[in-house]
Image (cartoon, rainbow, N blue to C red):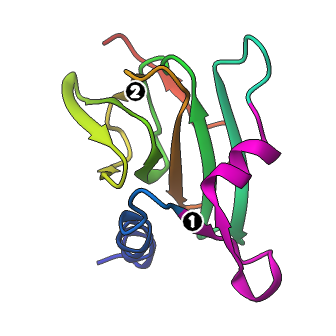
Amino acid sequence: MPKHRLLVMCCIWVAAGCGSSAYVVVPAQPAGQRVPVDALVEAHPLADGQNIRVVELWRDGTAMSCHFVQVRDRESPHIHARHDLAVTVLQGSGELFLNGQPLTMRDGDAAIVPRGTAHYFVNRGTSPAVAFVTFAPAFDGADQVPVTP
């Protein structure tokens, strides 16, 4: 198994145990401090009218990056041609569409999205959905190709 895929799977395993009192362990914090998800939402709020906010929490050179993502409504369908990703819902609920098939996601649910897989998330709650997303290799911000659902 390639090293980056093993790292993604480990991140899912760690993040999947978050449950209702979710925390994110952020290496940049002193001694890998556990940061409550509510504190991350408060520190990085969605602006009025902003649909999606992505905050990079950590990067291991080019191997992988971890992000805190909020979705008010929905993403547009897309693929990542050069990145695998793992998504763990920390708060909220919705549907993750993978190759057109909806998967219900709620607190603590995790999914792997292999590179080249058409996907998008639709928030079904009244508050923004919050997720912990890991990209391997590290996300470069430019690998998002729109697709028709």
Camera sees residue 76: yes
Q: In this figure, which residue is indicated by the disc labeled 1? A: 23
* Position of residue 125 measured from the top left corner of the image (x, y, whole percent): 42, 23
One can see residue 139 in this view: no
Dot 2 amino acid type = Tyr
| Amino acid type indicated by mark 1 | Tyr
SS at badge 1 = strand
Q: In this view, does 53 lie above or below 113?
A: above
Mark 1 neighbour class, 10 Å CA radius: few under 14, some 14 to 19, many 20 or more? some
> Can residue 38 be found in the magenta stretch?
yes
State how many labels appear.
2
Where is residue 9, by image quadrant? bottom left
- Image position of 34 with respect to 37: above or below: below
Q: Residue 60: give x, y in percent of width and height.
A: 68, 73
State the residue in front, 51 or 90. 90
Q: Is residue 124 magenta?
A: no
Around disc 2, counting alpha carbons within 10 Å, would you say few (fewer than 14), some (14 to 19), or many (20 or more)? some
- Residue 134 is left or right of residue 85, and the answer is right
Q: Earlier in the sequence, mark 2 or mark 1?
A: 1
Q: Nearer the viewer, mark 2 or mark 1?
A: 1
Circle 2 residue: 120
Q: Quadrant of the N terminus?
A: bottom left
Q: In this view, does 60 lie above or below 147?
A: below
Q: Residue at x 37, y 76 (%)?
A: 6
Residue at (73%, 28%) from the top-left corner?
46
The picture quadrant where one finds residue 79 is top left
Region in magenta: 23-45
In the orientation shown, which residue stands out farthest toward the bottom?
A: 31
Image location (x, y in percent) of residue 4: 45, 71
2 and 1 marks in contact (CB < 8 Å): no
